[in-house]
Every structure is written in C-alpha cells, then in structure tokens.
Amino acid sequence: MELQLIPTRDKVDFKKTTNIIEYSDIIFNKSPFIEANTKSVSLSHLKEKCIIPVFSKDNERTISHHEFIEVVCDVVNSIFPQNVISEPEIRVSHQIKGRVPTAINKAANELLEHEKTIYYERMAFIIRIPSITDTINGNRISLTLGGVRAYNQENLYSKKTIEKFKFFIGFQNQVCCNLCVSSDGFVDEIRVGSYSELRAKIATVIESYQAERHIKQMKELTQYKLTEKQFAQLIGRMRLYNYLPKEEKAIIPSLNLNDGQVSTIAKDFYQDERFCKDEDNTINLWNVYNLFTSANKSSYIDTFLGRNSNAFEFTQGLITVFNGSRIYHWFLG
C-alpha cells in the first residue's frame, strides 16, 4: 500500500493510509542530521539551563526554543495519534553567555556554575515518525518533521513584535540521516505572535503536505543517470555559478550550495561509500541528490533547511534537461 497523507480538520488514521512497521525494526544511523558548528543538547537542558531572551525595549519575552519544540510535539501527537513518535533530536549553535548580577566583578575563570547564564542563538530539531516509511534505491526513508529558530533573525533590541520560525515536514534517509525536504513541505518563515497561532500554522503545513507526491518525485530520480563527463560539467558549472554577472544569474535557476560544499560533492562522487558513482562511472540522480544533502550538513543552522529544499528542487530540475527543457540547460547542456 502506498504512503498517503490526507489533509483533514480532525485526526488522521495513518494505519489505513501508510506503510506501518514496528519501531524496533529500525536501527537509526548515529550521524547527526546537521553538523557544521552545532552540538547536541536535550530538551531538558533547554528548559532548565537556558535563559529566555526578551525584547529589550519592553522586556516582553520571546517564544523559547523548548516551547517551539513542545508546540510541534503536541501538534504531531494530535495528528499522528496511532504512530510511534521519536524523542526530538536537537542541535544548537552560537552560545550566548552571561552572568548573574552578583558575579559582576568576578573573573571569568572564577565563575561558579549557578552564576553563569546561557542561551543559544540558533537551534534546529527533528522528530521522526519511524512507523511511516518507504524505500528508495535500497535506502529506507522515514517521515520526519522539524524546525529552526534563529534569534539572529529577530530584532531583540525593539519592542515585542511578530516572531519568525522555520518548519518542515519531509523524510529522512536512514542510511545517512540526510533530510529530504521539498518546497511544499517547508516554510522558510512562519510569522506568529502567539502559541496558538504557531500551533495552527504548523498544523496547516503538516495537513497540506503531499507525502505520496514527494515520494514519487524522489523515486523518479533513480530513473535518470549522469555519465562521469556530465557530472564533471555539472560540478564545473556549479563552481562558476556564484561568480556570474547578476543579469545572467537572474535568468538561471537558483543554486544555494557554497563552493566548499561543491568541493565535497566532487570528492564524494568518488569516495562516498553510499552514494558514489557506479562501476560504469555513472551516477543516478537520487545519489546526486544525496551527495547534495550530505554536503549541506556543513551549513549553519539558519541556512540549512533553505539549502536542503533548494537541493531537491535543483536535482528535480536536472530531469527536465533529459526531457528537452532548456531551463536547467546552463548547468547540464
């Protein structure tokens, strides 16, 4: 039975619409979903050890990282009541340090733990639903949701205003823990002023997501192959892309990966044990896509999801070259 999500105002019985497997059947790869300069923390650490930033002009507090995660968990449990839900996997970066007033004159190396304050400027998390699964090219993928909060994209020096969040629903490749995010399952900026508004907008994204269509598009990638020469041309064009004049760049489909990530993709074409070229020196677009998403793990938290979504759109666009379209012809003519 093919996986299908059905938009509804009430709860969805996913046992009737999805492939169900036992949670114990899945052994998750220990690789993190994002690397860069991030570290892993627990939800309890965010709740108990971190202060909550405020808008400085009126001292109104922000929606904290842990509250964002808890809102998403609540929505996920209400929409997927019959499914196994994993504990959130949380990654943070850009620690902001402070101290309590009584320690104002102490040297940094003399501070006691209770005199220190911290919060993290950027946070990303995912929640897996391992009982909703499919297989592509021998790789098991599981339904996954998550979000990003980046305080550097808020004006905390002003009065309280609309707050911004990123949210996605897609899949995770369990072979490598790469995320598979499509544009219809990703919102780059959810703008809300309250918990109830945040909850409602997250629920709308989940219920509008077309999982069956997304899986079909990913499976289609396995049907197209690049030769080594075509892949070399693609890499060369990707390197040139960021240096194009603005006028030329404006008429070419966007590519958000940076030069370092393009170099990683080139290296992994030969060296990645999971997604490298085949013995005949060809590579299918599913593997190309996974080289892109693997390289994207080096992105900072605030750009990670946008680049991931762009990688999928870009790889899909390469298919059109095989069908005679000239939209992506500059990259793979």
Image (cartoon, rainbow, N blue to C red):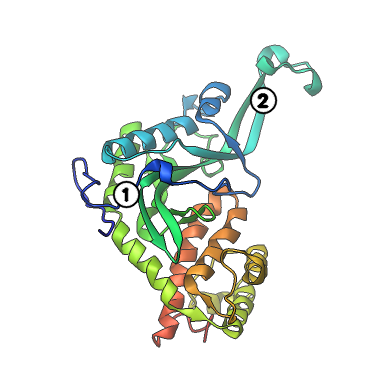
188 vs 230: above or below: above
Q: Residues within 10 Å of mark 1 (few under 14, many from 20)?
A: some
Task: Name the residue type under label 1.
Answer: Val
Point out residue 280 in the picture as x, y percentages from the top left corner: 58, 82
Q: Distance between the residues labelled 1 and 2?
A: 36 Å
Tag of residue 205: 1
Q: Which residue is drawn at 39% across and 46% down?
A: 130
Side (left or right) of 74 relative to 86: left
Tag of residue 286: none
Q: Mark 2 points at which residue?
A: 98
Point out residue 218 in the picture as x, y percentages from the top left corner: 40, 66
Of the two numbered discs 1 and 2 in the rendering, the one whose residue sits closer to the viewer: 1
Q: Which residue lies furthest to the left in this view?
A: 9
Side (left or right) of 266 relative to 84: right
Task: Name the residue type under label 2.
Answer: Gly
Point out residue 62 in the picture as x, y percentages from the top left corner: 46, 30
Q: Residue at x 49, y 65 (%)?
A: 311
268 vs 172: above or below: below
Q: Which residue is drawn at 56% across and 47% down?
A: 301
Point out residue 17 in the picture as x, y percentages from the top left corner: 23, 52
Side (left or right) of 301 relative to 212: right
Asked whether disc 1 touches disc 2, contact meaning CB atoms under 8 Å apart, the reply is no
34 vs 295: above or below: above
Q: SS of the residue at dot 2?
A: strand
Q: Nearer the viewer, residue 96 or 259?
A: 259
The answer to which image quadrant residue 122 occupies is top right
The answer to which image quadrant residue 38 occupies is top right
Q: How crowded is mark 2: few (under 14 residues within 10 Å), some or many (20 or more)?
A: few
Q: Which of 149 and 25 is in front in this view?
A: 25
